[in-house]
Image: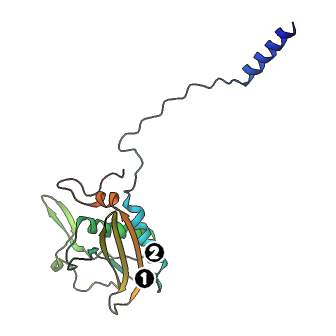
């Protein structure tokens, strides 16, 4: 009898510790348009450059107007821009704007060019730009290829005196550099791995 009571008490104890959970509801599938945006892997590294430029500044940046130029390969003649360098500069403008730094997009024209291929307000033709652009400082930068990635150096320079008022540097791993580099007809920016 004691055994039976001990067995019943033990079974009651074990059963009291068990909980029956309701069946989980299936997760709603998001359409491709509803999925949350995931920044490219390069955004982290470009953000580091923007933060360093803001933090290392020796002047009050709120009193400046900044233009961002294409980063150049250190072995080039500084007149060649790769898709990597151009995308890096575009991302830097985004990150600097997020940091509330005063930017000017000097490649914006005073008109909209309507063509069969689209409507455009940006240009690379210097003849379509204002001769006088009120930029006081410019971000210039270089990049150097290494075995495992690219070293990027940036400087914020007073456009008149050529004084360097801030500096930044970051290393971007090769995997991220490949996301920003053009490969035949593929898109320049790819989904982060």
Q: Position of residue 154 (x, y in %)?
A: 36, 77
Disc 1 versus disc 2: distance between alpha carbons? 8 Å
The image quarter in which residue 46 lies = bottom left
Asked if residue 17 is positioned above or below residue 39 in the image, the reply reads above
Residue at screen point 26% across, 75% down: 72
Is residue 96 visible to us here?
Answer: no
Is residue 49 visible to us here?
Answer: yes
- Whether residues under marks 1 and 2 lie with C-beta atoms below 8 angstroms apart, the answer is yes
Residue at screen point 41% across, 80% down: 167
The image quarter in which residue 118 lies = bottom left
- What colouring does the structure picture have? rainbow
Q: Report which residue position mark 1 lands on.
A: 166
- Single out the residue that lies furthest toward the left: 116
Q: Position of residue 93 (x, y in %)?
A: 36, 70
Residue at screen point 84% across, 10% down: 3
Q: Report which residue position mark 2 lands on.
A: 52
Local secondary structure at mark 1: strand
Residue at screen point 40% across, 52% down: 38
- Single out the residue that lies furthest toward the bottom: 161
Please rate how many residues cluster around mark 2, counting C-alpha atoms within 10 Å: few if below 14, some from 14 to 19, many from 20: some
Q: Nearer the viewer, residue 68 or 105?
A: 68
Going by the image, does 38 lie left or right of 55?
A: left
Q: Earlier in the sequence, mark 1 or mark 2?
A: 2
Going by the image, does 3 lie left or right of 146?
A: right
Q: Nearer the viewer, residue 89 or 172?
A: 172
Q: Position of residue 170 (x, y in %)?
A: 40, 70
- Single out the residue that lies furthest toward the right: 2
Q: Nearer the viewer, residue 113 or 36?
A: 36
Residue 130: assigned label: none
Which quarter of the rendering shows the N terminus?
top right
Local secondary structure at mark 2: helix
């Amino acid at each position: 009898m004691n055994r039976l009571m001990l067995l019943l008490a033990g079974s009651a104890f074990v059963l009291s510790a068990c909980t029956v959970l309701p069946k989980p509801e299936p997760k709603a599938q998001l359409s491709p348009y509803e999925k949350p945006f995931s920044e490219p892997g390069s955004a982290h590294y470009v953000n580091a450059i923007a933060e360093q430029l803001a933090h290392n500044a020796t002047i009050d940046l709120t009193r400046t107007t900044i233009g961002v130029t294409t980063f150049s390969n250190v072995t080039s003649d500084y007149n060649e821009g790769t898709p990597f360098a151009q995308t890096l500069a575009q991302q830097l403008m985004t990150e600097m704007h997020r940091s509330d730094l005063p930017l000017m997009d000097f490649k914006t024209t005073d008109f909209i060019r309507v063509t069969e291929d689209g409507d455009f307000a940006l240009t690379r033709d210097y003849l379509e730009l204002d001769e006088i652009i009120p930029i006081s400082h410019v971000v210039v930068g270089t990049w150097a290829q290494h075995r495992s990635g690219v070293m990027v150096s940036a400087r914020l320079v007073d456009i008149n005196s050529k004084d360097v008022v801030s500096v930044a540097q970051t290393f971007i791993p090769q995997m991220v550099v490949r996301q920003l580099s053009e490969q035949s007809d593929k898109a320049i920016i790819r989904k982060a791995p």
